[in-house]
Image (cartoon, rainbow, N blue to C red):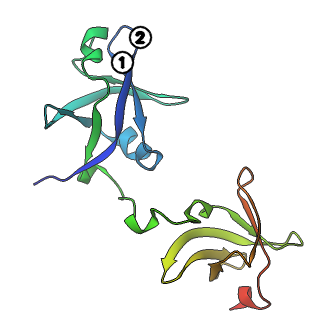
Amino acid sequence: MEGWVEIGKTGKTHGLKGELKLQVDDFFLEDLFGAKAMFLDIRGRKTPYFIEAIRGGGAIIVKLEEVNSLEEAAALTQKPVFLRESDVAELPDPEDEGLEYGFLAGFALYSPIGENLGAIESIEAYPHQEIAVVRSRDKREVLIPLTEQFIVEIREKEKVVVMDLPEGLMEM
């Protein structure tokens, strides 16, 4: 039996030719853009709608086959959108949810004197603390405890975290 992954929901209609705006979790955008069909929950059943065209930008706009008017599209607004599990490359790790520092994945790690120490590849939950998995400049994997005593500054716009790490930690 096919499993389902809820990726977002339909929004308002767009234009007069049956297009819909979609609100989709960023994690699933690539999967949606590669899918031939998406599924809407219509009266409790997953109903397939084949994607005729899809475009992104500020908003995701989808044109579904056999939905050709504003009225037909209006009947499909505010519905949960699903993909088949087989159409999704990777499911989100439930352990990533609720991590205080999970948003730091992808940030650059710097020392207080401005030295680039590497890139944070992921954040992992360990008993009693979160750990940054850092790829150092010399390509080694280093595990860094994320504690307030080490974090000097987080600059979200620049995707930079400054940490004052104990001597030798990056050499381990």
Estimate the x, y position of residue 149 in percent, counting from the top left.
Answer: 74, 79
Q: In what quadrant of the picture does the N terminus appear?
A: bottom left
Q: What amino acid type is highlighted by mark number 2? A: Gly
Nearer to me, 99 or 8:
99
Dot label at residue 19: 1
Mark 1–mark 2 contact, CB under 8 Å?
yes
Q: Is residue 124 above or below residue 160?
A: below
63 left or right, relative to 160: left
The residue where tag 2 is placed is 15
Please tell me which residue is depicted at 28% across the width and 36% down the height of the picture: 80
Nearer to me, 145 or 49:
145
Please tell me which residue is depicted at 67% across the width and 62% down the height of the picture: 107
Please tell me which residue is depicted at 71% across the width and 64% down the height of the picture: 108
Q: Quadrant of residue 25?
A: top left
Please tell me which residue is depicted at 25% across the width and 22% down the height of the picture: 65
The extreme left residue here reads: 1
Estimate the x, y position of residue 63 in percent, counting from the top left.
Answer: 34, 22
Q: Residues within 10 Å of mark 2 (few under 14, many from 20)?
A: few
Cα gap from disc 1 to disc 2, whole angstroms = 6 Å
Identify the secondary structure beneath mark 2.
loop
